[in-house]
Amino acid sequence: MKSILAVLAGIPAAIAQPVQSDYYLREEIPLPKDEVMEVSSIALMPGRKVAVATRRGDVWICEGAYEADLSKVKWSRFARNLHEPLGMFYKDGSLTLTQRPEVTRLRDTNNDGRADAFETLGSGWGISGDYHEYAFGSEPDKNGDIWVALCLTGSMGAKSQWRGWAMRVTAKGEVIPAVSGLRSPGGIGSNAEGDLFFTDNQGPWNGSSSLKWLKPGSFQGNPSGNIYYTQTDEIGPRPPDPTNESRIVSERRRIPAFVPPAVVFPHAKVGNSPTGIAVDLSKGKFGPWEKQLYVGEQTQSQVQRVCLEKVNGLYQGAVFHFLEGFEAGIIPVRFDPQDGTIFVGGSNRGWGSRGSKPFTFERVRWNGKVPFEIKEMKARPDGFELTFTEPIDPKTGSDIASYPMKSWTYIYQAAYGSPEVDLSEPKVVEAKVSGDGLSVRLKVKGLVQGNVHYLDGKALRSAKNGALLHPEAWYTLNEIPK
């Protein structure tokens, strides 16, 4: 009779099922008592202080947000009565923020802890009182300009001047139209190379939400604001109106200025309302995600991870689920590269969120353990290359059945959103694992330019028999490499 040990020796080891808390610690930062703190902007200040602006127009300074004992945080109000600031940064002793009608510099000239000087750095776009006329401001770009992404009126039209545009505010106070075709931005930020991006939400001419590259002079897809081309000669002539019920890949050929979404976030599968953008320049202080983007998600109360690359002059790449469990709908995402801490804030007023609280201010820290993840997904002329955070099991890694894929696009149309259309199932016909096990080269039959390519990696295992923390990837294939 076989011994129990002999029998057990033939049983495969249990598959390790990872969870977020194995790697990342999410913590709520206590807020001022009896205050409505619908956090809309976050800025990092010297002395490990954090500035927080709210949708109600207050600016607060938080001390202790980095400390182990968060019960001892201290808050002081720095300013009030601003108009829904969405985007704020600290520079040269001042806080600069973008509120609905202008970009404003706040200074404390008498050192009493309160702003007493309010300087308009740039304005000139229209506001009507419409709830949806948000203005999202960036940090200074590589030229020192602040970019402002302007939502459409009611998210549908451009009744106020320059709605649906991105404007550059220079150090001289010039306000220059830079990009047209925006619909409903939820955030703005740069990548590691200093190029600006914004998140645009599903709606007219947006089949699904996405991350878009603010290439200077480009058209981003929604023609509602193009009526203002008559008021500027900064970026060339008005582009042709798009053809209704078309496809982006075909309209790109007709409209040379049209820059397609860099990464589409399939509706409900990845999220519903992408928001703030932060780039990881920490050199590994938050894990192996250097130069990748962290993107907030309002409806699902999450932060997603985006891996970008540039192919044939256009940005494209993959989005992965990353962090979840936040207590309200995320709006700003601020990453401290020196400390390796992510700060997020949010609100669920106007739109519901998975997080059940009306507002929140939270931080996330990495504990030093690296999860088994698809680190990057890159396009190749005949497929994709996946890199992993740790060596992959050679058996599952080389099995083509481990990589089921689907592909689809969206109707490019004036109607709100779009179903997934032109569905196909690209086939992985070869999976070649690298010698170190850290990458797999996939040869794929049936790539479709312009489509989202979905990869399901649930069958993959690490060399230690671990499952992927986030097994799904969605790659937007604007260009197939030559």
Image (tube, helix red, strand yellow):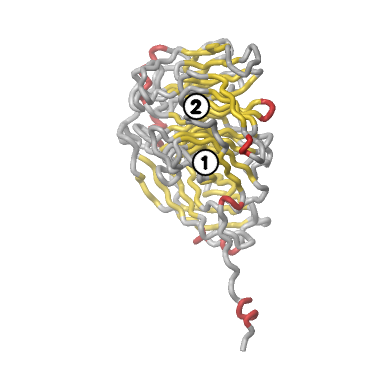
Report whether residue 397 is seen: no
Image quadrant occupied by the N terminus = bottom right
Residue under the point 44% across and 36% down: 358
Question: Residue at label 2?
Answer: 54
Dividing the picture into quarters, in which one does residue 286 lie? top right
Q: Locate residue 70, reporting x and y percent.
A: 62, 38
SS for dot 2: strand
Question: Residue at label 1?
Answer: 303
Residue under the point 59% across and 20% down: 95
**Residue type at the position of mark 1:** Val
Q: Report the front residue among 152 and 361.
A: 361
Q: Locate residue 461, reporting x and y percent.
A: 58, 60
SS for dot 1: strand
**Residue type at the position of mark 2:** Thr
**Around disc 1, counting alpha carbons within 10 Å, would you say few (fewer than 14), some (14 to 19), or many (20 or more)?**
many
Look at the picture and state if 169 lies above or below 48: above
Q: Report the front residue among 229 and 361.
A: 361
Q: CA distance from mark 2 to mark 1?
A: 20 Å
Look at the picture and state if 397 lies above or below 128: below
Going by the picture, which residue comes out furthest to the front? 34
Q: How many marks?
A: 2
Going by the picture, which residue comes out furthest to the bottom? 1
| Horizontal side of residue 220 vs 320, given as left or right | left
